[in-house]
């Protein structure tokens, strides 16, 4: 049995997953059972970070992957962000890096940042 702490909701159920049958115990909802099986067979995570931005009132732009990537490739994906600099304006949801590591996952902006000094939503042409 593999112990797993569920991170799907704030409860943090302590799961036990049988590696052979993938039977999950300790979950208080169906989402915990799905998470436990996935965590034992193919653990994945959404990755959050920041990249440099030029021309905005802030020096960093928050980004995240738009879908899970394999847990063992997180640091490799993070290293890609070291070489990325974007220019303002940027809108929430804009793709900052596409198809990272061939995973069909993208890094997307999680905040709208207008050009420095521009009123919100009034970016220069």
Image (spheres, rainbow, N blue to C red):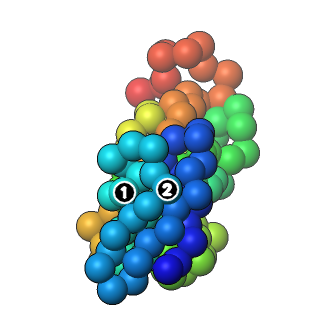
Q: In which quarter of the image is residue 85?
A: bottom right
Q: Residue at x 54, y 34 (%)?
A: 111
| Labels in figure, total | 2
Is residue 69 among what the camera can see?
no
Q: Residue at x 36, y 48 (%)?
A: 31
| Left/right of residue 9 with respect to residue 100 in the rendered view | right
Q: Residue at x 39, y 43 (%)?
A: 29
Q: Name the residue under label 2.
A: 26
Q: Which residue is drawn at 63% across and 70% down?
A: 82
**Number of the front mark, 1 or 2:** 2
Q: Mark 1 points at which residue?
A: 33
Whether residue 28 is situated above or below residue 15 in the rendered picture: above
| x then y, percent, for residue 115 | 58, 30
| x then y, percent, for residue 7 | 54, 52
Is residue 124 among what the camera can see?
yes
The one of 86 and 66 positioned closer to us in this rendering:
66
């Amino acid at each position: 049995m593999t112990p797993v702490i569920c991170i799907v909701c704030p409860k943090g159920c302590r799961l036990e997953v049988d590696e052979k049958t993938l039977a999950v115990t300790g979950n208080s909802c169906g989402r915990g059972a799905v998470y436990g099986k996935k965590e034992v067979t193919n653990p994945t995570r959404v990755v959050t970070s920041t990249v440099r931005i030029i021309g905005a009132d802030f020096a960093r732009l928050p980004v995240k992957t738009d879908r899970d990537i394999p847990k063992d490739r997180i640091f490799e994906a993070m290293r890609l962000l070291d070489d990325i600099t974007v220019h303002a304006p940027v809108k929430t949801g804009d793709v900052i890096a596409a198809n990272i590591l061939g995973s069909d996952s993208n890094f997307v902006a999680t905040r709208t940042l207008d050009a420095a000094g521009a009123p919100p939503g009034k970016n220069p042409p």
